[in-house]
Amino acid sequence: MKKQVLFLLAFLLILSPGFSQDYSYDKKIGAENARQVPLTMGIYNDSVLSAYVSSVGERLVKQVEYVPLDFNFHIVDMQEPNAFALPGGYIYVTRGVLSLVNDESELACIMGHEMIHAIERHSVKQMKKKILPGLLQIPGALVGIVNPSLGGLISAPVQIGSALFLSSYSRSQEKQADRLGIDLASKAGYDPSKLAIILENLSKDVETLTGEEEKKSYFSSHPFTPKRVSYLDKEVDKLQWTPKVPIAKNKEELFGYLKGMCFGDNPEQGVFKDNKFLHPDMDFTITFPEKWQTQNIPVAVGAMQPKGDARIVLQLSDTVANPDSLGLDFVRKFKKKYKESPKENRHLEINGYPAYMVMLSDNSSGKTVNMFLYWIKKSDVVFNIQGLGYSQYSDTIQNCVQTFRELTEKEKEGITSLKLDFAKVKAGESLKAFSERTGNKWNEEVTGLMNGLEKGAKLEEGQYLKIAVEVPYISKK
Ligand SMILES: [Zn+2]
């Protein structure tokens, strides 16, 4: 019996390593999804920091055997702490993860974990399930004309953002990614015990900063439980590894890479103040209905009624024609296709800007659904606003569009951003005194979290700590 088992194992070892896997499907679907990441989540542009993250990734890649994947590493322009892998070897970490890193090994362990998801093809098996249920869809009759003419963003729930890419892995896949991920990191000379540390800080960060958005967070796909910690501890104990000098040789160098990184909203993408959206570079603001869930992605900004019964999406039109001709062109196509006129269509002005509005109505589901399409010309740019909702939301949608206008000087001056920086602790300094001296905008809790400090820990002279400084946003226009 035993002999047979051994024989079988040897046989499997020959057949099952990575090279026997066909990754062509992974590469194809990975590339398709990777094209969506800059459009829906945004890629953070900092060539030095990106090169650093990639160089840590390349160290890990060198330890991967027999896998014909072209790994590549990217920073996502989001504060939400998140890391994910797309099939085919696309690995992403957000600004939120990087702001928590206090040791290169932490970053390496997170990336190693995600690389294993790609190598073991975990997400390919999960990707087909991504449909968000229960939201109002564009009535069937209108899809054919609205989508091709207007890019189709309204037909996808505004919320889609990162949720699109978060696969929910099975528990056994997570265990495998943890075990093989830290093994990979340790082979590259990184401390495998650091995965538990960064995961703990990530989970605290999600609690502190994005409390109510649990659903979108890293931990919806990577539950962080005491069981997982003890599993990790056991796996770490099994590993034999030799530390190598990291790429960032010490904290000063590591924090040097992170210095200047945006923390929180990046004003380049526009910022929300409650439900008022301000875009300094494009010089406009719009106020979405109170209590609606807002979302800002690189190609659009929008809001959704909490139950999904109505939504509004604003995006740039890819043309600079005047609103009347764009609106009338749409009406002409609509009439040709449906042999009927829109419920309403007219020229109007919105805060002095020429605009055109088309209203469509549909009763095919038994309940009236109205759709509003607006083209608004401001300077040389045409903004396209689409609203969709049951009829009781028609006024809300139209009132929202009326809040579209340019920014006041005061509003422009009020837009600031937080940037990561770091400073050295002086002898006998408390965290409070340190923060006051350095102009640190984080409170004590967040400062402690970002630096992985224990509650009430005494600071040491000469210790480097990350801080956040507030700087006025200077529009690039
Ligand atoms: Zn995972």
Image (tube, helix red, strand yellow):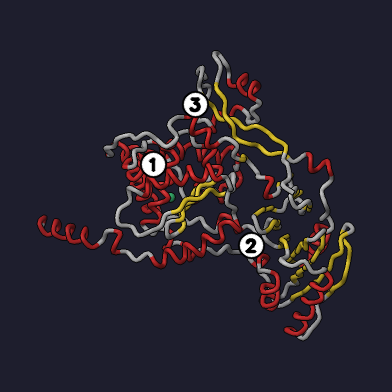
The Cα–Cα distance between marks 1 and 2, rounded to whole angstroms, is 35 Å
Disc 1 or 2, which lies upstream in sequence? Answer: 2
- Amino acid type, label 1: Lys
On the rendered image, what quadrant is the N terminus found in?
A: bottom left
Among the two numbered marks 1 and 3 on one chain, the one whose residue lies closer to the N terminus? 1
Dot 2: what SS?
loop
228 vs 165, left or right, is left
Q: Where is residue 207 in the image (x, y as percent from the top left)?
A: 56, 39
Residue type highlighted by circle 3: Glu
What residue is shown with label 1?
A: 227
Instruction: Work out whether residue 48 or residue 124 is closer to the camera in this orientation and state it.
Output: 48
Q: Which residue is drawn at 52% across and 25% down?
A: 464
Quickly name the residue at label 2: 157
Count every numbered label the image shows and give the total: 3
Q: Mark 3 highlights which residue?
A: 454
Quadrant in which residue 416 is drawn: top right
Quarter assignment of residue 206: top right
Considering the numbered disc 1 on the image, is that residue within a helix, a strand or a loop?
Answer: helix
Q: Nearer the viewer, mark 1 or mark 2?
A: 2
Residue 213 lies, with reference to residue 248, above or below; the image says below
